[in-house]
Image: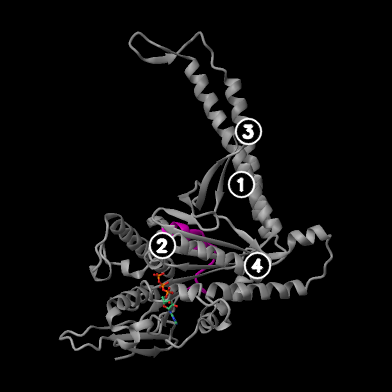
Amino acid sequence: MAAPQPQSSSFRVYTRWRPPIGNESSLSEMECRVEQHGTNHSISLASQSNSKRPRTWKSGPSFARVFPADAVNADIFEGVVAPTLPRVMNGATCKFFAYGHSGSGKTHTIIGYNYEDDQHLGLYLSSARNLFRAIAEIKNGLEPSQADDDLDKEALGIAVRLYEVRGKYAYDLFNNGTECHVRQGYDGRTYIRGQTEMLEGGKVRVRPIVAIPCWSYDELRRVVLDGVEKRKNGSSTVHDESSRTHAFLELEIITKALLEARDAVIERESELVPVGKRATDIYLEEHKRTLIRTPEGMLIPDPNVPLNQERIDAAEVEKRECEARVKEAEDAVADYLKGRRQPCLGGKFVFVDLAGSEYFDQGAGISGGTTKQTSQERQQGRQINTDLFALKEVIRARASNQARLPFRSSPLTMVLRDYFLATDDEESAMILTVSPCESQIAATMNTLKYGNLVGDAGGSTKN
Ligand SMILES: Nc1ncnc2c1ncn2[C@@H]1O[C@H](COP(=O)(O)OP(=O)(O)OP(=O)(O)O)[C@@H](O)[C@H]1O
């Protein structure tokens, strides 16, 4: 029989085995075999235990590459992220997901635990450092023909955003973990908005996720490590909590001029709120004033009290003018990006440390159900399951060019919508982190099965 043909799924899936840690080195390991099929790989797992019904499983040719336990973070960066750098430097958005059970190495891969040694730097910081190097090359190639102020506004930097998605909310780690609402706007886009601030003159400002602009790698590193520290301190037990949230780490190439243009949109939106409210109030007030109650208790227009249509119209005109100013500010951002002097402006790396895979398809229970869960934890588990299922469905729908993409199926996919729609999935990837321990074979198989479905987005393998 002919060997299965590798699928040309645009979304690549990698597997990274971690070494045994702590007392795991004295425990037995599962058996793993990797076979190559063209450019893809399949993985076979078998338990080594003497149980009567040993567990075995074989994937389809769904994996772009399998990194062995002795691979360090620098190898993952070179093999997975570095090839996408030219695309980000051309304005694309490249997304990387880490998926695996709690303690399998997601944070080790994305953020890392050693910030001094280049070999062990997490993908996020390695990407930032390489982006700064690429930006410096562009700067070096430029002739300073503009005025100093203009040059300052047009200097390239990197904005970092760091937030967690849990349930229906996002939590902004650069804004004291502020709870932000995730909702779909009238234009179909997803808006993540934080606390409402009441300003002078009735203005109401609702801030999006905070972006901290950084102008050097050292500055960015300081800012990120501070945010990561906040993530740890905000959790009761690091592993329990971090495995229940999806952490988003974003790097975007920006200029001061771009950030100022975006701030202008928020400012104008804040002006629109009281003007819109006034127009509604005047409309209601006028209509109420002209109504009378009949003896039967019905409200009808009073023929002796004319409606002050002029007052209503004036308020409407003011509101429309304000809406036009918001639109003008939005267009200024779009025009600035369209006419950008540097193609890299707006280019993004997005890293998502997904909630623990032990939740996926386990319903209310996790990891064999040995731990008694509270009802809140069970609900969180169900939500994570919904999120991870929805993510897989979105990736598969995109790979098969479906017209309708189910972004609204979960808060996670709603947040991911704009990242997905910004660029195709050509250079995006999922990294499955797995443990070699026999005792964790169920969780490892669960992770690989999920990755198999994602990597098989073209549809060759069956489960
Ligand atoms: N590839 C690896 N090489 C060496 N050590 C690793 C590797 N992967 C993970 N570890 C170590 O294993 C431990 C758990 O890893 P990590 O914190 O990254 O897990 P996680 O998947 O992020 O867990 P959680 O979802 O609970 O946050 C850490 O001490 C980490 O340093």
Report the Cα–Cα distance between label 4 and label 2.
27 Å
Quadrant observed for ligand 1 in the rendered image: bottom left
* SS label for mark 3: helix
* Front tag of 4 and 3: 4
Please state which amino acid type lies under the numbered disc 1.
Ile
The x and y percentages for residue 320 are: 61, 35
Indicate which disc, 1 or 2, sits on the residue closer to the N terminus.
Answer: 2
Quarter that holds the C terminus: bottom left
Give the amino acid type for the residue marked by disc 2 in the picture.
Thr
Along the polypeptide, which appears first: circle 4 or circle 3? 3
- In the rendered structure, are the residues bearing label 4 and label 3 in contact, judged by CB atoms less than 8 Å apart? no
**Residue at image mark 4:** 219
Nearest to the observer: residue 300 or residue 448: 448
Residue 362 at x, y = what percent? 27, 66
Q: Label 3 belongs to which residue?
A: 201
Q: Where is residue 104 in the image (x, y as percent from the top left)?
A: 38, 76
Tell me if residue 24 comes above or below residue 307 in the rendering: below
Viewer can see residue 391: yes
Q: Is tag 1's residue or tag 4's residue first in the polypeptide sequence?
A: 4
Dot 4 or dot 2, earlier in sequence: 4
Residue under the point 65% across and 53% down: 333
Please identify the quarter of the rendering in which residue 202 is found.
top right
Could you say whether the residue bearing mark 4 is in a helix, strand or loop?
A: helix
Residue 362 horizontal side relative to residue 232, left or right = left
Residue beneath disc 1: 266
Q: What segment is highlighted magenta in the picture?
A: 412-429
* Mark before the other along the chain sequence, 1 or 3: 3
- The dot on residue 113 is none
At label 2, counting other C-alpha atoms closer than 10 Å, the crowd grade (few under 14, some 14-19, many 20 or more) is many
| Residue kind at label 3, given as amino acid type | Gly
Q: Alpha-carbon neighbours of circle 3 within 10 Å: few (<14), some, or many (≥20)?
A: few
Judged by depth in the image, the label closer to the viewer, 4 or 2, is 4
